[in-house]
Image (tube, grey):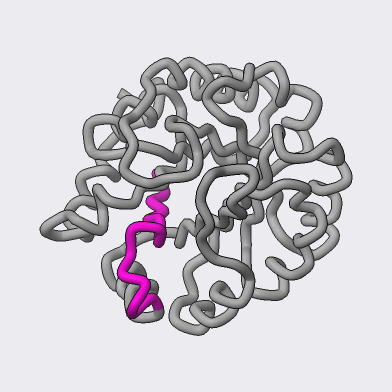
Amino acid sequence: MIKIAPSILSADFGRLGDEVRRLEKESADWVHVDVMDGVFVPNITIGPGVISAIRPYTTLPFDVHLMIVEPGRYIEQFAEAGADYITVHVEATDDIRDTIAKVHSLGKKAGLSLNPETPFEDLLPYLDDIDLLLIMTVHPGFGGQSFMSECVSKIAQAREYFDSTGSDAEIEVDGGINRRTAKVCVEAGATVLAAGSSLFKAASMEGEIEEWRKFTFPGDG
């Protein structure tokens, strides 16, 4: 089944705990947490302290996307704060393999992400070691951007690779995801949909999630 991961970047930060609790009530599968450092991307969001503060509000997995330079320095902090999936960018560190190993050593799921301009081939040395591949369909750093359709081919490449190796790694997409683009991504092979404004601004988040779950994977008809 497709997993829906609302991004709390679009939540009301004045009552963030209640917003996180709401996601469970609205039938979301994961909580997507965008961490930005103002260096790797031109914006600053939240850190381990905030994640730790909102962790008690839900039992949903925390899908923590680190858009920060040299993320290996902070893996332990995010793990201790309550992250379940910790995703780093292939462009953000020269120690990708060591960073993935550190995430696993802490009992967490390791993810790897790439920006729209980064070739899919840059990921190939690491795909057998990760639990999640996050394909950015916008330039990271800000919410509300338009979906970049040229990134869909990377979803298809990832689906082909994981199917050929028998991997059960998740393929997540993030950026400009709404009902129309979510369908395109799932049909290309995505299994997790991260979205902010299109879910938080929906008349009914639960109703919107229900519609997205109707989309089918390649070959499912």
Q: Residue at x 28, y 35 (%)?
A: 215
Horizontal and vertical percent position of residue 137? 44, 30
Residue 8 in the image: above or below residue 88: below
Is residue 1 something that shows in the picture?
A: no
Is residue 49 something that shows in the picture?
A: yes
Front one among 90 and 55: 90
Quadrant location, the C terminus: top left
Image position of 83 (left or right of 75): left
Horizontal and vertical percent position of residue 146? 31, 31
Residue 164 in the image: above or below residue 64: above
Task: Residue 107: say if magenta.
Answer: no
Q: Which residues are magenta?
A: 1-16
Horizontal and vertical percent position of residue 164? 66, 20
Q: Residue at x 26, y 53 (%)?
A: 199
Image position of 157 (left or right of 145): right
Horizontal and vertical percent position of residue 120? 63, 19
Front one among 66 and 207: 66
Task: Residue 3: say if magenta.
Answer: yes
Q: Quadrant of residue 124?
A: top right
Residue 143 in the image: above or below residue 135: below
Residue 111 in the image: above or below residue 159: below
How many discs mark residues in the rendered view?
Answer: 0
Q: Residue at x 54, y 82 (%)?
A: 53
Quadrant location, the N terminus: top left
Q: Quadrant of residue 184?
A: top left
Image position of 136 (left or right of 68): left
Q: Residue at x 48, y 15 (%)?
A: 153
Q: Quadrant of residue 133?
A: top right
